[in-house]
Image (spheres, rainbow, N blue to C red):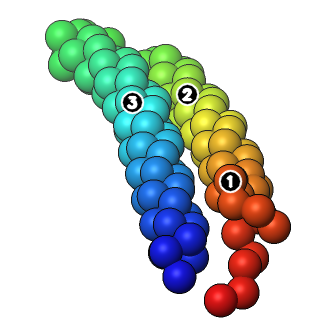
Amino acid sequence: MPAQFNDFSSYARQMAATASRMHQLALENAENVFGVQLRTLERTSTATAGFLGELVQTGAQTPLPSRLPKGLQVARDNLEHLASAGHEVIGLSLKAGQALGELVRQPPATAATPGGGNEAG
């Protein structure tokens, strides 16, 4: 009976260690994804604010239709940055998923008892 308890204790420790590692991987992935999204938000908001600042500075001196191509270019660049960030987030999530999958596929270590811990009695 004590050998079975030691096996159970060993498996419980391994499961706790695996769960802890999985939690760490998930948090690292969330942190990386948040960083990518924050950088993208900063980049797009800076570009948009710059364009709006130019628009306000020129005011009535420059007709609005002449500023339209620049506004469309800023919008296009922002969409490209968002799409690129989306691709990067998907890549990060796939990497994290693969790491989690590898962690789950690892077989539990067997106890060093005769018969692999399957003793009867």
What residue did someone put label 3 on?
35
**Would you say 55 lies left or right of 77 here?**
left
What amino acid is found at the position of numbered circle 3 in the picture? Gly
Q: Position of residue 50 (x, y in %)?
A: 29, 15
Circle 1 residue: 112
Q: Name the residue rendered at 57%, 76% in the picture.
A: 4
Task: Quadrant for residue 99, please give it.
Answer: top right
Tag 2: Cα neighbours inside 10 Å, few (<14), some, or many (≥20)? some
Q: Amino acid at mark 2?
A: His
Which residue is the site of mark 2? Answer: 81
Residue name at image x 69 percent, y 60 percent: 113
Residue kind at label 1, given as amino acid type = Ala
Which quadrant of the figure contains the C terminus? bottom right
- Give the CA separation, mark 2 to mark 3: 14 Å
Q: Earlier in the sequence, mark 2 or mark 3?
A: 3
Would residue 21 be found to the left or right of residue 42 on screen?
right
Residue 116 on image: x %, y %: 77, 64
Q: Is residue 90 above or below residue 105?
A: above
For label 1, count other residues whose C-alpha is less than 10 Å away and answer few (under 14), some (14-19) or many (20+): few
Q: Secondary structure at mark 3?
A: helix
